[in-house]
Amino acid sequence: MLLSEQEILRRQKREELMRMGIEPYPAEEFVVNAYAADILKNYENNKIDYKHVTMAGRLMGFRIMGSAAFAEFQDATGRMQLYFRRDDLCPGEDKTLYNTVFKKLLDIGDIIAVTGFVFTTQTGEISVHVQEFKILNKSLRPLPVVKRDEDGNVHDGFTDPELRYRQRYVDLIVNPEVRDIFIKRARIITTMRSYFDANSWVEVETPVLQSIHGGAAARPFTTHHNALDLGLYLRIATELHLKRLIVGGFEGVYEFGKLFRNEGMDRTHNPEFTTVELYVAYKDYLWMMNMTEEVLEKVAVAVNGTTKAKFGEVELDFAGPYPRLSITDAIKQYTGLDVETLDEVAIREQCRAWGMEVNESMGKGKLIDEIFGEKVESNIIQPTFIIDHPVEMSPLTKKHRTKKGMVERFELFVNGREIANAYSELNDPIEQKERFEDQLRLKEKGDDEAMEMDDDFIRSLEYGMPPTAGIGIGIDRLTMLLTNNASIQEVIFFPQMRPEKKAEIAKESDYVSAGVPAVWVPALQKMNILTIEQLKSANANKIFNDLGGMRKKLKIDEKMPLLDDVKSWVE
């Protein structure tokens, strides 16, 4: 591995600390009694509590002024200023701790512990006057330099999505606002959990590895259990196991869990995502709509302090009640097409007239679902329940009590996206088996998202499942809406990424082929331009300016190249 100049220097500092008898990675506990956010919020009103503070965090910047220095310090709650004075840190004759350890061996990114007292500087900034400090971790890689002006505007930010998602740990360090997204995500989950627990519904866990994939229309991931010599699927839903627990006598069960669907990736889809599914006995989908309004209103307030949330240019309002619109009425409202009066052939012809891709395997229900997705859902901005779906698209749902060919199902749409799906659950085992058989026929026609037959689930229903309402809510999409993020990758700590391309370090001959004289190759490598791709994407003016300093440092006995020569290297 070819290290950059900074990485080499930091490793040398690590070795120097060890030679001095300072452990750069100590094992013992360090007890913290104060945090940056708490100090900045409460110090002016309660100064007596901050006469002796101990803190731990990361150094994010230095301003050394001879025998004194200021540093920017970041802990888990935020940033604040530290003040160091040589004679406070080194009251005796030996000034090594300040002159050598602090000034020469510490870097931005190092984690330290400090003890001192809080005061206000002459410029009015609340700071900690450090009396003791200790190295807790020597950072071997330099952080991206993110500059912020006096107004808080960011310059040269760590903004490349590819790098941010792949190196989320760096993103969280240098972009504090990212941490807030995930704190809000956690608050969404804890608020829901508290609401469910207050209703005495039990949080449970069900298998991730399943021999039959079911509970949704989706393509699964496959794996293999060696000991059993058995092919298995990663679950696409938790539904069928949770309903088995309702059969077993639980009146309400829920699970926050990861689901896995082997499908496309885009700004609203990740192959591994999080949902909560809830099932409550003796309820129906009408009750579930009321419950959904109530819990989402509580979640919105818990996250943002209000039922309203800004998403792009739109202000969403999660205060209930939400409009309730049947899927057929929604299609009629936004397209003028009355699908209830048309047969499958006529609907398919209309889809083709609109330029939609449809085929003969799609029944009337599937075609209605396609029309809704293509022509309607993007128009639904404020939280809206789309209710009463075709039976063909809802194999686990109870038939509608009054509307033939429909089921008691709703999907909650917000800002053109589905964030929840709920049913009055089908609990007739004979009809459920027939629905599974219909799904098998669709699979034979080529529908690779159709469900499998689950004989054990049918057997459980034969023991009797009470009338039940169930819902699944997408945690990732809900977090997107409540944190004003248009990409699902922003609200998942470690979204799925393509394998990282390992750039091959260029050889001297590669630089020469690109037009760089061999004498300047070591200078470019010291400047951390290690591949031809980096060279071609670099700024010629910056290379030219840096070469002057590197020429002296490496004692290159060669006349400086012209700026036009350097420009030819990067073109």
Image: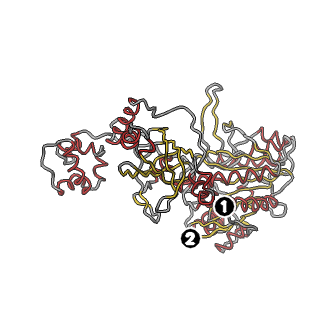
Question: Disc 2 or 1, which lies upstream in sequence?
Answer: 2
Front residue of 391/408: it is 408
> Where is residue 32 shown, x and y percent of the image?
59, 43
| Amino acid bearing label 1 | Asp
In front: mark 2 or mark 1?
2
Q: Which residue is mark 2?
A: 313
Residue drawn at x 53%, y 46% as measured from the top left? 116
* Residue carrying label 1: 369
Question: With 547 as the anchor, is 137 left or right in this view?
Answer: right
Q: How many numbered discs?
A: 2
Which of 23/298 is in front?
Answer: 23
**Residue at point 83%, 46% (across, down):** 430
In the rendered image, the residue lying farthest to the front is: 92
In percent of width and height, residue 131 lies at 49, 44
Residue type, label 2: Glu
Q: Residue 377: horizontal and vertical position, in percent? A: 63, 65
Quarter that holds the N terminus: top left
Asked whether 264 or 336 is in front, the reply is 264
Find residue 457 and report its image quarter.
top right
346 over 208 or under it: above or below = below
Q: Secondary structure at mark 1?
A: helix
